[in-house]
């Protein structure tokens, strides 16, 4: 049985050849072209009705701006309690409303943020801004991934024909390609409400980001 197994293994090897596996990474640096700001407005009043009224006006104000894309606008009102002499005491109502403001135009986002931080939303109202770093929009991202995938396939064909076949002195071809995309991470860069008092909301630098794919290749040679 042992000799038969070895013989069959040799025939199988001669008939089907052998496999060679390797990994390769392809990447490209892309200038990010879109930035988002998360804006939250908190207000306080004696009644829930007053809070809702203020939040509705703030919502109308934000949505009147067309130079940037604005999403969100959900608001809520809730009782506010404070502690005096170790006792929980009712102290009117609070409410908040939040928006995500996005633009591909640097001047448009700068103008909007500057304007909104100067806006007087009334008593007992605070505004805070958290910005995201510049990111690559979905369309540009997918176009870059497609370019890298095509590059990875061409590389495999060329490597099998011109490099691997010459190294092993056998005819090799690509039998399998697995591609994994690596998407760039976009962190939040927070600015506190205190910074809003002097309208200081600096934009982060628009530095290139790397988009890459990892390719796992299997070549068959015989």
Image: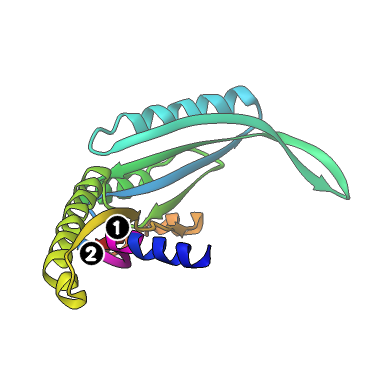
Q: In the rendered structure, which segment of residues is drawn in magenta?
A: 12-27
Quadrant placement of the C terminus: bottom left
Q: Is 123 situated above or below 59?
A: below
Residue closer to the observer: 63 or 104: 104
At 49% from the left and 57% from the top, the residue drawn is: 192
Q: Residue 105 at x, y = what percent?
A: 20, 48
At 88% from the left and 50% from the top, the residue drawn is: 85
Packing grade of label 1 (10 A; few <14, some 14-19, many >=20) is few
Q: Is residue 16 magenta?
A: yes
Residue 200, by quadrant, is bottom left
Examine the rendering and report whether any part of residue 58 can be seen. no
Q: Which residue is mark 1?
A: 16
Residue 155, by quadrant, is bottom left
Examine the rendering and report whether any part of residue 39 can be seen. yes
Do the CB atoms of the residues marked 1 and 2 lie less than 8 Å apart? yes
Q: Residue 25 at x, y = what percent?
A: 28, 66
């Amino acid at each position: 049985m042992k000799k038969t197994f070895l013989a069959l293994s040799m025939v199988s090897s001669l008939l089907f050849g052998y496999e060679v596996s390797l990994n390769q990474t392809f990447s490209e640096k892309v200038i990010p072209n879109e930035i988002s700001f998360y804006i939250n407005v908190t207000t306080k009043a004696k009644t829930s009705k007053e809070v809702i009224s203020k939040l509705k006006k703030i919502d109308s104000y934000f949505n009147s701006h067309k130079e940037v894309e604005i999403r969100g606008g959900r608001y809520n009102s809730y009782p506010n309690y404070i502690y005096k002499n170790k006792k929980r005491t009712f102290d009117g109502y609070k409410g908040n409303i939040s928006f995500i403001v996005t633009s591909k135009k640097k001047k448009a986002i700068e103008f909007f943020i500057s304007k909104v931080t100067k806006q007087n939303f009334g008593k007992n109202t605070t505004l805070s801004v958290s910005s995201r770093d510049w990111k690559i929009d979905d369309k540009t991202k997918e176009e870059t991934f497609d370019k890298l995938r095509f590059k990875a396939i061409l590389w495999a064909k060329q490597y099998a024909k011109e490099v691997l076949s010459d190294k092993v002195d056998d005819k090799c071809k690509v039998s399998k390609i697995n591609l994994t995309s690596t998407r760039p991470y976009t962190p939040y860069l927070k600015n506190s409400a205190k910074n809003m008092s002097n309208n200081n909301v600096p934009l982060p630098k628009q530095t290139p980001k790397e988009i890459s794919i990892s390719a796992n290749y299997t070549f068959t040679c015989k």
